[in-house]
Structures are given as C-alpha cells and as structure tokens.
Image: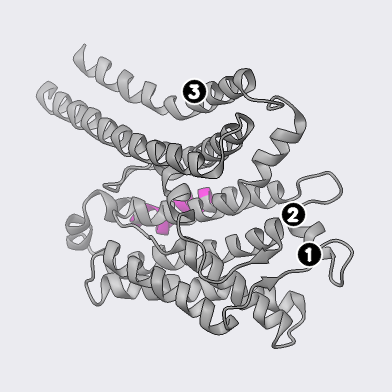
Amino acid sequence: MDNQVGHKSIGWQKLLAPAALVILYIFFAIFGRNFFDTYTLKTILESSYYIGFLAFGVTFVIITGGIDLSIGTVMMCAAIVGGVAYRTWGLPLWGALILVPLVGLGFGTINGLLVTKLRLPPFIATLGMMLISQGFGSIVSRVQTQRYPTIGTEDEWFKNVFFRSGQFPIGVVYLIVAFLIAAFLLNKTRFGRYTFAVGSNEEAARLSGVKVDNWKILAYAVCGLFAGFAGIFYAGTYTTVIPGTGNGEELNAIAGVVIGGTSMSGGAGTMVGTLIGVFIMATLKRGLASMGLQSHWQTFFTGFVVIAAVLLDNARRDAATRVRTVDKVGK
C-alpha cells in the first residue's frame, strides 16, 4: 500500500510543471492587460526560441550531475563572432551562420575538457568560461555592437528564415525540430543512456566499463553546440548583439530545466519537461510585463522562481528516496 502511495506521489509531481503553466497563463489572462490574445501567444513563442535551445543543451549536462554557467555568454559570443565574420571579415551571411554554432561547440568542448581532464568542479570551470567567452566576444568585436540583417536590408531573408515569416513565428518550427532531436539523443541513443548512467552513479558507470570522461565531454560539447544555435535565434529575434552581455540568460534556461523536472543532482530529467519549463519562464516574463511591472521586477520574481525550482527539485529527490526505501523494505 505504501509502495503504491509513493509511486502515486512521483506521478503527481510529473504533472506539476504542465499544471503550473496552465495556472500561470490563466492568472495573467485574468490580471494582465491584453494578455489573452494571439499576439501575446506569439510573443511567448518568439521569446522561447533561444532560451529553448539553451535549455535543451544544458539538460544533458545537468543530467550528468554537472552545470554550465557559461551558456548565456557563449551564446552571445558566438553571435558576435558571426556578426564580425559577416560585417568585418566579409563572409557571406550563410558562412557566418555556420561559424556561430561551431564557436559554441568549441567553448562547450573546452568546458568538458576542463571538467574531465583537469578535474575542475563544473561550477568553477564554466564560471571561468563565462568570463572568457564574454571577454573574447568583446575582443573580437573591439567592443562594437554587431547588427544582423533586418527586413528591408540586404540579406533580409535572415529575419524571414529565423524569426518570423510574414505573421508566422517560423522559429517555433526550429524549436520543435531541436526538441525532437534533443529528445531522440536523450532517449534513443547510447549517448543518452550513458548520460543518465553517469548522473545516477558515476563510479558505478566507470566500474561497469563506461568511458565516463568521454561521455561527459560529449555532453558539454552538445550543450555548447545548442548554445551556438541559440545565438542565431537571439540575433534573429533582436537583430543587435551587444558585447559583454549574456549574463543571466543561463539562469532562465537552467530554471526552465529544473522546473521541468530535471534533477540538479543528476540522473533524472526529460526534454518534454524542459520544453514546458521554457514556456513557463517565457509566460512569466510576458505576464509580468502585461501587469505593468518593469524589467527589474521581472528579474526579482524570476529569482524567486529559480529558488522555488531548486526547492521543488529537493522535494522530488526526497520523495524518490522514500519510494526506493519503501521498495527495498517491501522486498
């Protein structure tokens, strides 16, 4: 009987994120101004593009039991390098766009090497890389804002392809494709299985013959690659990319991941949960704006959401521990 109750509690917790999204949307529809309309829905989707890519990538790292604090600044740095390649180095736009995710892949791979080969704690390694990528973007651009093409300028196809085609938010198509790819990697490949194994018990995985370091490097590399793609969609959304920025974007992504059910201690998580968590963060941002709260209030409440997400993760972990204990006693 206790076993059934324990498993039911875990099942109910899986419904918390989608329930929170529905409740949040209803709340802002009632108390916000002009929130319940198609324009707001489109805005929520459009503000989810780059955060979604960041969140999908960092989900892999968090499931291994690590963290990547550099994804926000890596995203900006990659977009800045692409902008410099296009505006200053004379690369065609398509060539510059290929360079953007490669820059993210490079930073992610370095993060993985720092964590595995030099045995740096993930927090310290990625905090250092946050500063390095932030400075590197400023150095390459000579602290000059980079501007991507917009409607009515040369290469205006960029906006139509990566942000909005007419009135259709085309970026949501890429977001869905990225979600499907990330979910496939996590659930249907050896990479995904070993990601869970490393996060659940790294030493046991190592003793069973898993090359833990290689898979952890791959997790950070994939995270960096997704951050690079996020840079393209950030540029598509805002057109201008300012050197020295990006701090805080990683918290929005990480909060979305944790709200979606991925455990900060590793070994558990889903891409479906991450996608729902991303929409929760986007809805919160747009909803607070619809209530007339300025950006500093949005930051204030986002901080509460981050804390609440970690507390929820602790509660999930404690509940899972109780279920495992009951299972052992029952046997």
Q: Nearer the viewer, residue 37 or 18?
A: 37
Is 65 situated left or right of 92 in this image? left
Q: Position of residue 289 (x, y in %)?
A: 60, 36
Q: Nearer the viewer, residue 261 or 69?
A: 69
Residue extending farthest to the right is: 152
Q: Nearer the viewer, residue 296 or 45?
A: 296
Q: Position of residue 184 (x, y in %)?
A: 52, 50
Residue extending farthest to the bottom is: 89
Q: Is residue 316 above or below residue 174?
A: above
Q: Earlier in the sequence, mark 2 or mark 3?
A: 3
Mark 1–mark 3 distance (CA, rounded to whole Å): 36 Å
Q: Is residue 144 magenta?
A: no
Q: Quadrant of residue 99?
A: bottom right
Q: Amino acid at mark 3?
A: Ala
User: Which element carries disc 3, helix, strand or loop?
Assistant: helix
What label does residue 19 carry, if any? 3
- Give the image's coloring scheme: one colour
Query: Going 48% across and 26% down the picture, which residue do you hit?
Result: 20
Q: Quadrant of residue 131?
A: bottom left
Query: Going 39% across and 41% down the picture, which residue do you hit?
Result: 303
Question: Which residue is label 1 attached to?
Answer: 158
Is 169 situated left or right of 246 in this image? right
Question: Which residue is label 2 attached to?
Answer: 163
